[in-house]
Amino acid sequence: MLLTLAWGSLFFLGLFALSTWGLRRARPEWPVYDCLMISTRLVSSAQAVLATASGIVIIFYCRDVVTDRGLGETEGTSLLAASTQQN
């Protein structure tokens, strides 16, 4: 789980840095604020697309989304998720 978090952090940070760098080179007349804002929105859009895609995959592969478990989910992780939602 931590490895996935680390790779995701590196991916989105790299996407932000690359898009900021590319915009600064492509549009040198734009202020830094505009380049940062567009890069932030690009990363946010990428996160939204990936979250939507993962939700669609979950919906298609579970017969009953409320009670089914995913491939790597066990009873312990279900109880852990349920207890964190109550707090």
Image: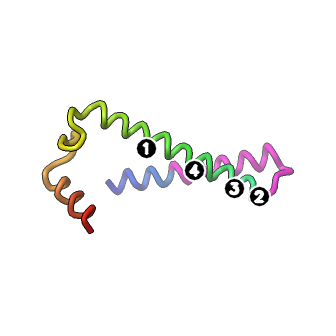
* Magenta stretch prevailing secondary structure: helix
Image-based side of 11 in relation to 57, left or right: right
N-term mark: 3 or 4: 4
Under mark 1, the amino acid is Ala
- Element type at mark 3: helix
Name the residue that disc number 1 marks. 51
Write down the residue under mark 2: 32
Q: Residues within 10 Å of mark 4 (few under 14, many from 20)?
A: few
Q: Secondary structure at mark 1?
A: helix
Q: Look at discs 3 and 4 and give the one toward the viewer.
A: 3
Query: Label 3 to label 2, Cα distance in Å?
Result: 6 Å
Q: Position of residue 53 (x, y in %)?
A: 42, 36
Nearest-to-viewer mark from 3 and 1: 1
Which residues lie in the magenta part?
Answer: 11-33
Q: Give the side of residue 47 with respect to residue 78, left or right.
A: right
Mark number displayed over residue 14: 4
Asked whether the beta carbons under mark 1 and mark 2 sit within 8 Å of each other, the answer is: no
- Residue drawn at x 81%, y 56% as measured from the top left: 31
Q: Are marks 3 and 1 in contact (CB under 8 Å)?
A: no
Query: Label 1, label 4: how many angstroms apart (C-alpha)?
Result: 18 Å
Q: Nearer the viewer, mark 1 or mark 4?
A: 1
Circle 2 packing at 10 Å, graded few (<14), some (14-19), many (20+), is few
Upstream in the sequence, badge 1 or badge 4? 4
Instruction: Report whether 29 appears left or right of 69.
Output: right
Split into 4 quadrants, where in the image is the C terminus?
A: bottom left
Q: Which residue is mark 3?
A: 36
Image point 56% across, 44% down: which residue? 45
Q: Amino acid at mark 3?
A: Leu
User: Is label 2 in a helix, a strand or a loop?
Assistant: helix
Q: Position of residue 85 (x, y in %)?
A: 27, 61
Within 10 angstroms of label 3, few (less than 14), some, or many (20 or more) residues? some
Give x and y (percent) for residue 16.
Answer: 61, 51
